[in-house]
Image (cartoon, grey):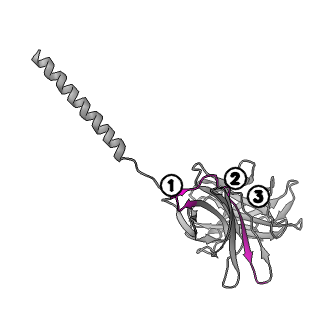
Amino acid sequence: MKTLKYISLLLITVLTFSSCSSNGDDETTKVEENPMEDFFLLKELNYEGHSVELYSENKTQFEIGYTPIYIRIKDKVTENYVENANITWKPMMHMEAMQHSAPSSKVMATDDPSIYKGYIVFQMPGNTTEYWDITFNYTLNGEAISKTERIDVVSPSDGFKRVNTFMGNDDTRYVLAYVDPVAPEVTLNDMTAVLHKMETMMEFPVVENYTIEIDPRMPGMGNHTSPNNEDLTYSTQTSMYNGKLSLSMTGYWKINMKLLNQDGEVLKGEDVTEDNPESSLYFEIEF
């Protein structure tokens, strides 16, 4: 009997200690994670009562070409990030003789309702006399707010071409920009691009249901191509153009392209032949 009493007391002590330890762990292991920890802060806009943070997933500055931007709005009073901010934006290039906008997507909330994402295709870099700005419209605590901020847009450090602005054979001006792969590999890569047209100096709608034929070549290696490439076609889900890019070795590649409309008519670009080593429509990558 004494042995049974001893065992019972021991079990009660262990269970009590375990319960206390569990409760203590619950109170001390609450860690607030920063979802933007691995992103690059491009710019922070500070205003009275709140701030707007602009992030990039893989760039340290605004560059010409396809530029995805993540946005967060912080309420300085509550120290919380704002959800349901209903953000819209308008990029604008201020040149000496004129102004124009740029292709851009809608700004949408991500899986985290306090983080918003969209993209802008900057067609040219700024300089000392010509510059870009973005007007942001959003709501904060029920108040409609509009802020315009100047940004510095630069050319990529490698100097490679990742955006084409051109007049098609149909007398329409297009903007075609490289999206993926960001980190190419020696394999059959998923390739993505965006295509917009200039309806006016301020409106650049997405072009749907065209075809972008690709012919990747290595100019430094006899201009050889690669097998199993798939032309880019339009996706209604993403409003982008998707295909397959075959890269058979590391080095410098020129992705020659032709743009075809819904009727299969070539609007821009040429076949690569012995007499014509490159198309007038192309992207450049190196890895």
Was residue 91 drawn as part of the magenta stretch in this picture? Answer: yes
- Looking at the rendered structure, the secondary structure element under dot 3 is strand
**Separation of residues labelled 1 and 2 (CA atoms):** 30 Å
Answer with the quarter of the image where residue 25 lies. Answer: top left
Label of residue 243 in the image = 2
**Separation of residues labelled 1 and 3 (CA atoms):** 35 Å
Q: Earlier in the sequence, mark 3 or mark 2?
A: 3
Q: How packed is label 3: few (under 14 Cα within 10 Å), some, or many (20 or more)?
A: many
The picture places residue 286, in percent across and down from the top left corner, at 59, 67
Q: How packed is label 2: few (under 14 Cα within 10 Å), some, or many (20 or more)?
A: some
Q: Earlier in the sequence, mark 1 or mark 3?
A: 1
Residue that mark 1 sits on = 35
Residue lying at the far left of the rendered structure: 2
Residue at (16, 22) in percent of width and height: 7
Answer with the quarter of the image where residue 134 lies. Answer: bottom right
Front tag of 1 and 2: 1
Q: Is residue 18 visible?
A: yes
**Which residue type does callout 1 highlight?**
Pro
Look at the image and tell me in which quarter the C terminus lies. bottom right
Q: Which residues are magenta?
A: 73-96
- Looking at the rendered structure, the secondary structure element under dot 1 is loop
Label of residue 212 in the image = 3
Q: Is residue 225 visible?
A: no
